[in-house]
């Protein structure tokens, strides 16, 4: 069992809710497929990067989409919340905030006004200094 795979208690709650009334052979590896789905959702990696221990990525992807369209995920979440007496917390990136010090130093713009220097000094021009530098010695 890998680090984030379903525990036996979680599997005992989820297993009876999974669809088994489909045409063709009955799926024998639903737990493995579910662990593969959770791996992809947790890691945020592409389906093609699914480790081989979870089965073919196409099978995991197709079953995930089929269950999403059939509303199986809503039933699973309701059952998990009920099994844990409503003490389930889910966190996604829309509610996670970074601490104010994690964003780096605050960018400050400092404006300095040199009022006194302009009153007593003579006027300088870039144009005049450029002309002197451009004169040739000949």
Image (cartoon, rainbow, N blue to C red):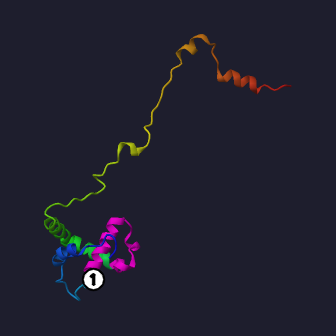
- Categorize mark 1 by other alpha carbons within 10 Å: few (<14), some (14-19), many (20+): few
Classify residue 51 by image quadrant: bottom left
Q: Quadrant of the C terminus?
A: top right
SS at badge 1: loop
Nearest the eye: 60 or 92? 92
Q: Tell me the magenta residue range.
A: 30-58
Q: Could you say where residue 109 lies in the image, as x and y percent from the top left?
A: 46, 31
Nearest the eye: 82 or 122? 82
Left or right: residue 70 compared with residue 124: left
Q: Could you say where residue 124 lies in the image, as x and y percent from the top left?
A: 64, 18
Nearest the eye: 17 or 25? 17
Left or right: residue 132 compared with residue 95: right
Above or below — where is 14 with respect to 104? below
Left or right: residue 80 compared with residue 109: left
Left or right: residue 17 compared with residue 63: left
Q: Could you say where residue 72 lies in the image, as x and y percent from the top left?
A: 19, 72
Specify the farthest residue to the right: 138
The residue at 22%/87% (across/down) is 26
Q: Quadrant of the N terminus?
A: bottom left
State yes or no: residue 67 in magenta. Answer: no
Per the picture, the main secondary structure of the magenta-coloured stretch is helix
Q: Could you say where residue 137 lies in the image, as x and y percent from the top left?
A: 84, 25
Classify residue 92 by image quadrant: bottom left
State yes or no: residue 47 in magenta. Answer: yes
The residue at 18%/82% (across/down) is 20
Specify the farthest residue to the bottom: 25
Above or below — where is 21 with respect to 2? below
Which residue is labeled 1 in the image?
Answer: 29
The residue at 30%/70% (across/down) is 38
């Amino acid at each position: 069992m890998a680090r984030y795979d379903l525990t036996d208690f979680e599997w005992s709650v989820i297993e009876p809710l999974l669809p088994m009334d489909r045409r063709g052979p009955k799926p024998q590896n639903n737990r493995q497929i579910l662990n593969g789905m959770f791996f992809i959702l947790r890691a945020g990696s592409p389906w093609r990067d699914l480790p081989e221990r979870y089965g073919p990525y196409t099978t995991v992807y197709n079953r995930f989409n089929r269950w999403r369209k059939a509303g199986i995920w809503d039933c699973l979440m309701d059952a998990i919340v009920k099994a844990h007496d409503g003490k389930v917390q889910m966190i996604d990136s829309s509610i996670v905030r970074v601490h104010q010090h994690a964003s780096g130093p605050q960018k400050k713009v400092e404006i300095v006004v040199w009022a006194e220097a302009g009153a007593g000094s003579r006027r300088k021009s870039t144009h005049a200094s450029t002309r002197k530098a451009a004169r040739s010695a000949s």
